[in-house]
C-alpha cells in the first residue's frame, strides 16, 4: 500500500468521524434547545406553586371539598369560588402531568416534586370529575392526564427526594464544588 492511499483512507476516516460527531452534537443541541423553550412555562408553574393562595386552595380541595359538597354536583354544580379553587389546583397538576407526559420534565423530577400531592388531589376530586364526565357537553377525558399521572405516582418506586439530594451532594463533593 502506498503512502498516498493510506493518507486518503486516513482523511476519509477523519471525515466520517467528523460527520458522526456533528450529527451527535447537533442532535443534542436540538434537544437542549427544545427543552429550553419550556423553561419559562415550568418557571411559571413553579411560581404558582409558591403562592399562598394556591396552597390555601389545595388545602381546601384536599381536606374540605368532599366534606362540604356532594360529588353529585359534579364540577359544574359547585359554587363559583369553590369551582375556582378546584380548577386552579386540578389544572396546576394537570399541566405538570402534561409536561411529564410530553417528556419536558423527567419522571424523577415530576414524581419527586408532587407524587404525594397529586394522589391526594386526585382522590379528593375524582368523584366530582367522574360525575362531570357523565354530562353530554363534557369531554369523557376531562382531567384524564391528571388521573393517569396520579396512577403513575401511586406506583412510582423511584428514590425518595432525600436520596436524590444525597446523591447530588455526593456528585458535588458535599461542599458545592464538583468532585
Image (cartoon, rainbow, N blue to C red):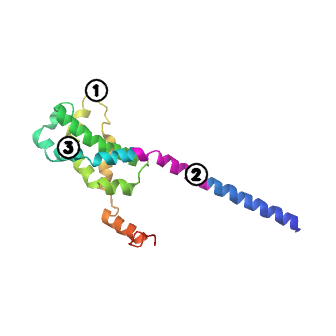
Q: Report the number of discs.
A: 3
Q: Residue at x 58, y 51 (%)?
A: 27
Q: Which residue is mark 2?
A: 27
Q: Which residue is mark 3?
A: 57
Estimate the x, y position of residue 139 in percent, counting from the top left: 31, 32
Task: Tell me which segment is drawn in magenta.
Answer: 24-40
Chief SS of the magenta region: helix
Look at the image and tell me whether residue 160 can be seen: no
Q: Residue at x 22, y 39 (%)?
A: 86
Q: Using a 10 Å C-alpha cutoff, classify the residue at mark 1 as few (fewer than 14 neighbours), some (14 to 19) or many (20 or more).
A: few
Q: Which residue is mark 1?
A: 137
Disc 1 versus disc 3: distance between alpha carbons? 26 Å
Estimate the x, y position of residue 75 in percent, counting from the top left: 21, 34
Q: Is residue 170 above or below residue 14?
A: below
Estimate the x, y position of residue 34 in percent, counting from the top left: 50, 46
| In magenta stretch: residue 53 | no
Amino acid at each position: 500500500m502506498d503512502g498516498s492511499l493510506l493518507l486518503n483512507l486516513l482523511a476519509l476516516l477523519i471525515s466520517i468521524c467528523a460527520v458522526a460527531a456533528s450529527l451527535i452534537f447537533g442532535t443534542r443541541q436540538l434537544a437542549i434547545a427544545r427543552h429550553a423553550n419550556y423553561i419559562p412555562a415550568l418557571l411559571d408553574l413553579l411560581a404558582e406553586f409558591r403562592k399562598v393562595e394556591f396552597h390555601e386552595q389545595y388545602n381546601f380541595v384536599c381536606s374540605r371539598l368532599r366534606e362540604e359538597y356532594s360529588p353529585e354536583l359534579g364540577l359544574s354544580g359547585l359554587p363559583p369560588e369553590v369551582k375556582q379553587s378546584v380548577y386552579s389546583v386540578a389544572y396546576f397538576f394537570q399541566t405538570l402531568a402534561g409536561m411529564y407526559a410530553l417528556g419536558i420534565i423527567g419522571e424523577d423530577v415530576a414524581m419527586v416534586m408532587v407524587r404525594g400531592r397529586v394522589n391526594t388531589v386526585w382522590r379528593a376530586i375524582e368523584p366530582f370529575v367522574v360525575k362531570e364526565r357523565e354530562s353530554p357537553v363534557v369531554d369523557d377525558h376531562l382531567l384524564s392526564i391528571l388521573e393517569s399521572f396520579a396512577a403513575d405516582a401511586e406506583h412510582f418506586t423511584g428514590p425518595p427526594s432525600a436520596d436524590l439530594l444525597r446523591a447530588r451532594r455526593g456528585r458535588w463533593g458535599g461542599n458545592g464544588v464538583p468532585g
